[in-house]
Image (tube, helix red, strand yellow):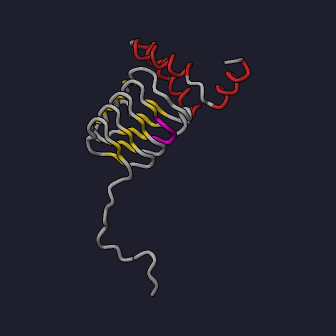
Amino acid sequence: MGIRSGIIDYSRGNDLTFFFCLYRKQQKSRGMVRDILTFFMSRSAHRHGGYIGPDAVIRGKPSLPHGLHGVFISRYAQVGVNCRIYQNVTIGEVDRKAPVIGDDCLIGAGAVILGGIQIGNHVKIGAGAVVCKDVPDGCTVVSQEPRIINGCEIKMGERE
C-alpha cells in the first residue's frame, strides 16, 4: 500500500491498525497505564464512529470492511478469530451478560446480538437480524422474530 492510499484509508476511518494496537496494549496493561490507554482507545473509537468496550475479548483482528462505523461491542462480549463485522452492528449486553461469538462468523450490517448467548463457529447472521437465542455451529440467521402487540387502538392502514 502506498503512502497516498494509506493516508486516504486513515482519513476515512478504514485503517484501524492504530486502534487495534492501542486495544492490544490496553488489554495487557494494568493500573493507571490501562486507564490512560483506555481513554485513548475510546477517543480513537469515537473518531471512527464506534465503540469497543475496554474489557471486550477480541481474539485475533476482526475484519471490519466498513471500518468501525456504528459498531458497538459490549465490554462483556467475546468475539472469535476471523470474524467479519459490517457497519452498524450491535453486540450488546443484558444484565451484564453479553454474547460469546465463535470463530469465522459473518455479521451483516445492522444486526443486533443481545444477551448472554452463544453464537457457534462459522455462523452467518444476516443484515438487520435480531439474535437473542443461542445459534449452533454452521447456521445462518436472518430477520428477527415477529411479535404481535395486542391491545393497539390505532390500526395502521385502516380508514374510518
Image quadrant where one finds the N terminus: top right
Q: Which residues are magenta?
A: 85-89
Please state the horizontal and vertical placement of residue 125, each as a whole percent of the image: 39, 42
List the single residue furthest toward the front. Answer: 138
Say if the magenta span includes residue 95. Answer: no
Give above or below for 23 relative to 51: above
At 40% across and 44% down in the image, what residue appears? 112
Please state the horizontal and vertical placement of residue 64, each as a whole percent of the image: 51, 31
Image side of residue 145 versus residue 128, left or right: left
Please state the horizontal and vertical placement of residue 150, each as a whole percent of the image: 29, 70
The image quarter in which residue 90 lies: top left
At 30% across and 45% down in the image, what residue appears? 132
Give above or below for 19 relative to 136: above
In front of the other: 1 or 145: 1
List the single residue furthest toward the right. Answer: 4
At 51% across and 39% down in the image, what residue appears? 87
